[in-house]
Image (spheres, rainbow, N blue to C red):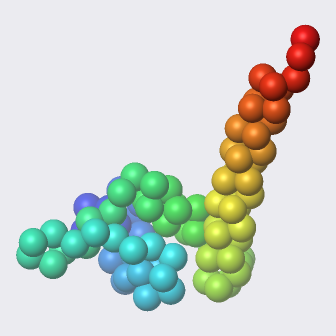
Amino acid sequence: MGRAAELLGVTQAFLRTLDTAQLLTPQRSAGGHRRYSRYQLRIAARVRELLEAGNSLDGACRIVILEDQLAEAHSLNATLQNALDEREPS
């Protein structure tokens, strides 16, 4: 956790707050230390940006969740469109 906080320029308490808010669910080492994926670090960095822009923690978490859902919907839409394009006769 210390290294993750250092990479992001945040405190360990900030990362624990995101864990408590259930935005991040880090893996645990055998010794019980939190281990964050690159994806989770990107989420934490985005939340930090949103907080610095004046959003509340709840608002920043909601924005990140909605951004993630939108990206997933765009990806699914592209996949379905490609499948549809392949089925249409030329």
Which residue is the extreme one toward the right?
90
User: Residue 65 lies in what quarter of the image?
Assistant: bottom right
* Res. 24 in view: yes
Name the residue rendered at 76%, 30% in the picture.
Answer: 82
Judge from the rendering whether residue 49 lies leftward or rightward of residue 24; answer left or right. right
Find residue 32 and report its horizontal and vertical position in percent: 15, 78
Q: Quadrant of the C terminus?
A: top right
Q: Nearer the viewer, residue 38 or 5?
A: 38
Which residue is the extreme one toward the left?
31
Find residue 83 and report its horizontal and vertical position in percent: 75, 32
Q: Is residue 72 above or below residue 86?
A: below
Q: Nearer the viewer, residue 42 or 11?
A: 42
Name the residue rendered at 58%, 62% in the picture.
Answer: 46
Judge from the rendering whether residue 73 lies leftward or rightward of residue 38; answer left or right. right
Name the residue rendered at 22%, 72% in the picture.
Answer: 28
Find residue 76 and report its horizontal and vertical position in percent: 71, 47
Q: Is residue 49 above or below residue 28?
A: above
User: Residue 19 lies in what quarter of the image?
Assistant: bottom left
Q: Quadrant of the N terminus?
A: bottom left
